[in-house]
């Protein structure tokens, strides 16, 4: 990447530092030299093994919404594909390990679960499945750390045609898409994934955040043979019951996993039912009649810690938090909390039976652009 590090990309973006490097892509923090805005820059070598950035750019264009990173531009520079998007904060994995204590952890997980279900409901309403749900793909907002963002859509795909409404078929692909630790049982077996698999992966992630590990995590490091590792993890996933998997946690976790596992391949999940599982826990402690108290308590616990650090004159080493974000949080604080309040209140008032919710299937966005480079140039 030395060539890109020395260049002014798209005549205005410069690489500042490395954020993360994987087999698929390299992610940098960059800066717009004209506006001084910090951005995230994902780079992939042209003709590489995975070739996912163009697909991710297309997907982000269809998913412009709250809690989804904003695509700024995309193109090719010096033998690399470069996708520039909104710069976000730390991963949820880092936040839960570093910024919160055990006293507040479960309440944060309930709030986190509600936002993640919302994100997946929106993505699925656009006929898209994520296929790589994991804690490293969930980030807090840089401007508003009370908002959870879902990222990394390089392996996402359409599960249903926007034009015909025809669902993909349940076939054996012999390919595994996603993280082995969180992937659903069907995905682990090598079968085509659908909406139910995204939700099942989310369930495993929530349990891991709550208990710090999953029963099959021990095989990831102890087993060197890849086939044996896959087989052992799959066997344990199939044999362990939802109740045993979520032992020590509220019953709603087991109900969540059980529901996701029982969904049919083409069945539309009842997102409202899944939300209500966590709302049942939250509403016992937070009366919805007192909106001011509710809004204050619906902030993640790390918000208070960040405010304390600022008041004590401590600065974050990571450039994600170098801005005076709390000044911006004050302005946006109520908007994100009120959004969640209205969502929860509406969800509680709805019929809690297992009727299928009416998901808005908006097909108004016709993605017929042949040359993405020409299109995204206009975004600037």
Image (cartoon, rainbow, N blue to C red):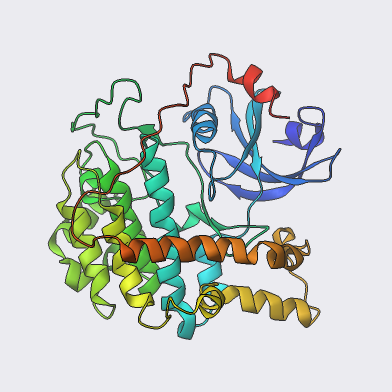
Q: Please give the name of the residue rendered at 61% of the width and 66% of the height, measured from the top-left corner.
A: 334
Q: In front here: 132 or 233?
A: 132
Q: In front here: 79 or 299?
A: 299
Q: Percent from the top left, x then y, of residue 377?
A: 69, 23
Looking at the image, is 119 positioned above or below residue 155?
below
Callout count: 0
Q: Would you say residue 113 is visible in this rendering?
A: no
Query: Where's the N terminus, which quadrant?
Result: top right
Q: Please give the name of the residue rendered at 26% of the width and 50% of the height, measured from the top-left corner.
A: 184
Q: Percent from the top left, x then y, of residue 209?
A: 41, 69
Q: In front here: 194 or 297?
A: 297
- Specify the farthest residue to the bottom: 103
Q: Is residue 137 left or right of residue 351?
A: right
Q: Percent from the top left, x then y, of residue 110?
A: 40, 70
Q: Please give the name of the residue rendered at 50% of the width and 43% of the height, measured from the top-left corner.
A: 152
Q: Would you say residue 213 is visible in this rendering?
A: yes
Q: Is residue 169 left or right of residue 49?
A: left
Q: Please give the name of the residue rendered at 59% of the width and 28% of the height, measured from the top-left corner.
A: 45
Q: Is residue 196 left or right of residue 123?
A: left
């Amino acid at each position: 990447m030395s060539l890109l590090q020395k260049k002014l990309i798209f005549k205005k973006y410069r690489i500042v530092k490395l954020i993360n490097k994987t087999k698929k892509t390299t992610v940098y923090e960059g800066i717009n030299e004209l506006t001084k805005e910090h951005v995230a820059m994902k780079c992939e070598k042209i003709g590489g093994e995975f070739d996912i950035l163009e697909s991710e750019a297309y997907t982000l264009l269809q998913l412009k919404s709250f809690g989804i990173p904003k695509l700024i531009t995309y193109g090719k520079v010096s033998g690399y594909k470069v996708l520039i998007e909104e710069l976000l904060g730390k991963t949820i994995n880092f936040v839960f390990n570093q910024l919160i204590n055990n006293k507040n952890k479960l309440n944060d997980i309930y709030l986190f679960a509600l936002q993640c279900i919302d994100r997946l409901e929106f993505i699925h309403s656009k006929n898209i499945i994520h296929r790589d749900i994991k804690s490293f793909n969930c980030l807090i907002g840089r401007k508003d750390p009370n908002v959870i963002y879902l990222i990394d859509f390089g392996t996402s795909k359409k599960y249903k045609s926007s034009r015909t409404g025809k669902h993909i078929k349940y076939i054996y692909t012999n390919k595994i898409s996603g993280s082995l630790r969180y992937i659903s049982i069907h995905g682990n077996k090598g079968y085509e994934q659908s909406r139910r698999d995204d939700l099942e992966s989310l369930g495993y992630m929530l349990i891991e955040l709550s208990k710090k590990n999953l029963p099959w995590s021990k095989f990831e490091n102890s087993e060197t043979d890849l086939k044996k590792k896959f087989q052992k993890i799959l066997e344990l996933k199939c044999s362990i019951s939802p109740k045993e998997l979520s032992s020590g946690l509220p019953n709603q976790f087991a109900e969540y996993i059980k529901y996701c596992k029982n969904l049919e391949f083409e069945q539309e999940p009842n997102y409202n039912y899944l939300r209500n599982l966590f709302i049942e826990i939250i509403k016992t402690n937070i009366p919805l009649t007192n909106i001011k108290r509710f809004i204050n308590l619906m902030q993640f616990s790390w918000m208070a810690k960040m405010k304390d650090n600022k008041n004590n004159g401590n600065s974050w080493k990571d450039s994600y938090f170098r801005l005076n974000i709390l000044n911006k949080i004050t302005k946006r604080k109520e908007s994100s909390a009120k959004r969640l309040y209205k969502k929860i209140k509406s969800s509680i008032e709805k019929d809690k039976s297992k009727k299928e919710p009416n998901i808005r299937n908006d097909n108004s966005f016709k993605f017929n652009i042949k040359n993405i480079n020409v299109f995204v140039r206009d975004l600037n």
